[in-house]
Image (spheres, rainbow, N blue to C red):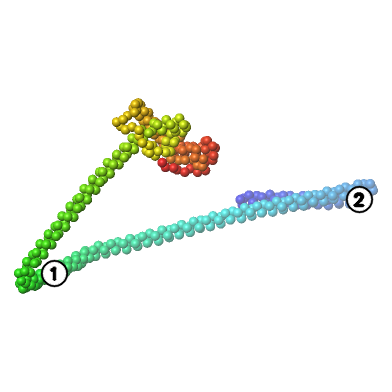
Amino acid sequence: MATIIARVNAAINFVTDLVGYTIRINYFLGEALFTLLSWAFGHVTTGTRTLLALIKMAVFDLGQFVEDLGGYVAALVAVAEGLVNLSCQLVATLFFAFLSALASFVSVVIGVGTSVYVTISSILDAIKQLTQVGAKSLVLVLHTIPLGLANGAKQACRALVAGWLATKEVAISVVYNITDGVCLQYRNARSLFRGLPGEAYLGVFLLITLLMVVHYTIRAIYLNRALLLHRSYHVTMKVLSTLRNGVNASLSLSWLQALPDRIGGTSSGSPGGEEEIDSSPSSSFESTPPYNLRQRKPGQRSSRVSRIDSIKRQLQAEKESRLCVICSDRRRSVVVLPCRHFSFCGPCINQSVRYYDHCPVCRTTIEEVVPVYQ
C-alpha cells in the first residue's frame, strides 16, 4: 500500500513539473518573439508591422491558452491528488480501525480466556479443598466409629440391665400384690362362709343351678327358632320361584298362541303390522288362549313353525337395525347430527367425515357427531 501511494505521488509530481516546464518554455518563446518583433518594427514597412502585430497578438493568445491549459491541468492534478490522498487516508483509517477492532477482539478473547481459566482454577481449588475436608472428615469418622459403637453398646447394655431389673421388680411386686389379694380374699371368704348357716350354702347351690337351667333353656329356644325361620325362608323362596316359573310359562304360551292371529289380522289391514306388534307387546298377554297343550288346533304344527320363523325374522330385523348401515358388520355407536339420517359405526363415520362434511341423503352440513352407546 505504501509503494502504491509513493508511485501515485511521483506521477502527480511529474505531471506538475511537466506543466511548469511547458509554461516556462512558453514564456521564453514569447519573450524571444517579442524581442524579434520589436527589432522588426524598426526595419519593416507598415504592412509588415501590422502583420507582425497580428502575429504578436496570436502568440499572446496562444500563450494565454497554454497558460490556461496549464492551470486546468494543475487543477485536475490537484483534484486527483486530493482524491488519492482521501482514498489513502480512508484506506488507512479503515485498516487501522480493523486492526484496532481485531486487537479489541483479541483482548476480549484473552480476557474471557483468563476469566475462564480463573474460574476453572477456582472450581478446581474448591474441589480440592472439599476433597481434603471430606478425606479428613472420613478419617475422623473412621477413627470415632469404634469408640461410638463401644459407647453405644455400653449404654445399650446398661439400658437392658436397668430395664430387666425394673421389669423384674414390677413383676415381683405384681405377683406379690396378686397373691396377697387372693390370700386376703380367701381369708375373707373363709371367715364369711364359716360364719353362715347351712341354708345359705343350699341357697347358693340352688341359685347357681337355676341360672344354668335358664341359660341353656334360652339358648335352646333361640337356636330352634332361628332354625325354623331359616327353613321357612327357604321354603318360601322355593314356592315363589315355582309360581314365577309357572306364570312365565303361561304367559309365553298365551303369547305364542295369540301371535299368528294378530300377525294375520295386522298384515291384511295395514303394511306396518310388525311395527304395531313391536309397539304394543303387552296386548298379547291380555288375550286368553283358545286352546291348551292337550287340545291342539288342527294344523297347529305348521302354524307353530311359521310363528317360529316370523319370530326369527323379527329378531334378525331387530339385530340388523342395530348394525351399521354401511358395513353391516359392527354395532352402530355414532349418529350424524342434526338430520339423524344415518347411524354409523366408529370406523365408517371417521371415513365419511374425512372426505365429506354433509349428510349423503339431505345434504345437510354435519355440525356435530354425538356418540350413542347401545
Residue 240 position in % (x across, y down): 28, 44
Q: Could you classify mark 1 by the number of other residues whose Cα lies within 10 Å: few (under 14), some (14-19), or many (20 or more)?
A: few
The residue that mark 2 highlights is 41
> Is 80 situated left or right of 221 in this image?
right
Asked which secondary structure carries label 2, the reply is helix
Q: Could you classify mark 2 by the number of other residues whose Cα lies within 10 Å: few (under 14), some (14-19), or many (20 or more)?
A: some
Count up the numbered dots. Answer: 2
Between 371 and 140, the one lying in front of the other is: 371
> Is 348 situated left or right of 13 in this image?
left
* Residue 144, visible in the rendered structure: yes
Residue 129 position in % (x across, y down): 35, 62
> Is 9 situated left or right of 354 in this image?
right
Relative to 151, does residue 116 appear above or below in the rendering? above
Q: Amino acid at mark 2?
A: Phe
> Mark 2 vs mark 1: which is more N-terminal?
2
Mark 2 or mark 1, whichever is nearer to me: 1
The residue that mark 1 highlights is 174
Asked which secondary structure carries label 1, the reply is helix
Identify the residue at image location x=42%, y=60%: 119
Q: Amino acid at mark 1?
A: Val
> Is 41 situated left or right of 286 in this image?
right
Give the distance between the C-alpha atoms of the residues marked 2 and 1, in whole angstroms.
174 Å
Identify the residue at image location x=54%, y=39%: 364
Label 2 with label 1: CB-CB less than 8 Å: no
Between 173 and 336, the one lying in front of the other is: 336
Relative to 59, does residue 247 appear above or below in the rendering? above
The quarter of the rendered structure image containing the C terminus is top left
Identify the residue at image location x=90%, y=49%: 53
Identify the residue at image location x=89%, y=52%: 38
Question: Which label is found at residue 343?
Answer: none
Residue 223 position in % (x across, y down): 18, 53
